Image (cartoon, helix red, strand yellow):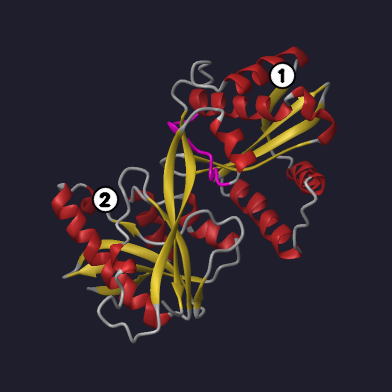
Amino acid sequence: MELEAVSRESWQSFVEMSSQGTIFHKPIFLESLELDCEYFLVKKKGVILGGMALPKSNNINIVSYQAYSGFIFHPEVMKKKPVKRIELQYQVLDFLANELVDRYNEINFRSIDYDHPIDLRPFYWLNYHEKDKPTFITSNVYYTSLLKTSSPLNQTELRKGRSSSLNKSKKFNLESELSGDIGEFEKIYLETFERQDVTLSADDIRLAKNLFSNLLTSKDAFFIATKYENEIVSMSMFATDQKRAYYLFGASKTEFRSKEVGTANLAWAIEYLHNHTKHEYLDMVGVNSPQRGSYKLSFGGSLVPYYQTRKISNR
C-alpha cells in the first residue's frame, strides 16, 4: 500500500463520496480551524481504498469544534460483502497505524461510521509482539445522537419533558426564520458561556468566528433565529454536507430561557430540514455530558458511537 498526496479539490470529492466523510473532513472546515493539512489517499496496486487529511506539522491533534477527523473509506470498499470489507478495512488501518506512528510525535483523532462498527484492532495491536517498543495506539469511545428528520416533532418520539417544553413554547407566539445575522449570534453565543461561567480563550473565539463566517459564505451552513416580540432571543447554527446536517452551535438569551425558546428554535430547524432540504438525518454532534446529552436526546434519535484514537508513550 502507499499514500498518495492529492489536491484540495480531489480530497473534497473523495469526502463527498465516502459514507464516512463529514463536514468536519472538508477543506473549508479544516481551513476555518486554521489547520494546515495535506490530503492523502491510501492505494493498493493503484486502487483507492481510503484516505486521511494529515497536518503538515509533527502532531495530529483534535482542536476546538472538530468533532470528527481521521480516516475514511472509498464507497467501493463499503459495498463489499462483510468478510471482504472487514479484510480491506483492516489492511488500510494497519497500514495507516504503522505510517502515522513513525511520522507524528502526537496522534489524536476521532473517527465515526454511522453504518458499521469501526475496526480499530490495527491500532490496538500496534507493536503487539514487540513489547520493547515505546509507543502504541489506544482508543476511547464517545457518543452522538443521529436524529431522523423524516417524521419531525412526532410527539411519540419526544421525551415527555421535551414535549411539554415544546407545547409551552407555542403559548408565546415565537417566530423562527433563517438568518444571516452573524453579529447577533456571536453576541448570544458568548453570553451563553458567560452564564455558564465558562471562559472561552481568544483562540476559541477566533476559530468560532471563522466557522460562522466561512461556512455561511460557502453555503455549508445556515443559521436559525427565533424571535419573541420581534427580538431575537435564540439562535442556532447547522452545518451541512451531501449526506446530513450537523447541529454545531445553539444559544439563547438568559432572560427568555423560561419561555423554552431554545426548544422552539431547534424544533423549527428540524421542521425546516424536513420540509425544505434533502437532509434525512441530523447529527446532534455529541451527547457526552449529562445535561447536554439529556437535552439533545430528548428530541429522539439513535445513539452512534465514535472513537478517539491516541498515541501514548508507554504501556
Q: Which mark is residue 277?
A: none
Q: Position of residue 177 (x, y in %)?
A: 67, 27
Left or right of residue 235: residue 53: left
Question: Would you place residue 65 above or below residue 154 in this image?
Answer: below
The residue located at (37%, 61%) in the rendering is: 71
Q: Which residue is mark 2?
A: 75
Q: What element does badge 2 sit on?
A: helix
Name the residue carrying label 1. 169
Q: Is residue 25 magenta?
A: no
* Residue 241 appears in the picture as rendered: yes
Name the magenta segment's main secondary structure. loop
Please tell me which of labels 2 and 1 falls first in the chain: 2
Q: Amino acid at mark 2?
A: Pro
The residue type indicated by label 1 comes to Ser
Question: Which residue is pictured at 85% across the width and 31% down the height?
Answer: 255
Decide whether residue 278 is among the magenta residues.
yes
Q: Is residue 110 above or below residue 225?
A: below
Which residues lie in the magenta part?
A: 277-288
- Residue 237, how many percent across, how many down? 63, 41
Residue found at x 29% / y 67%: 122
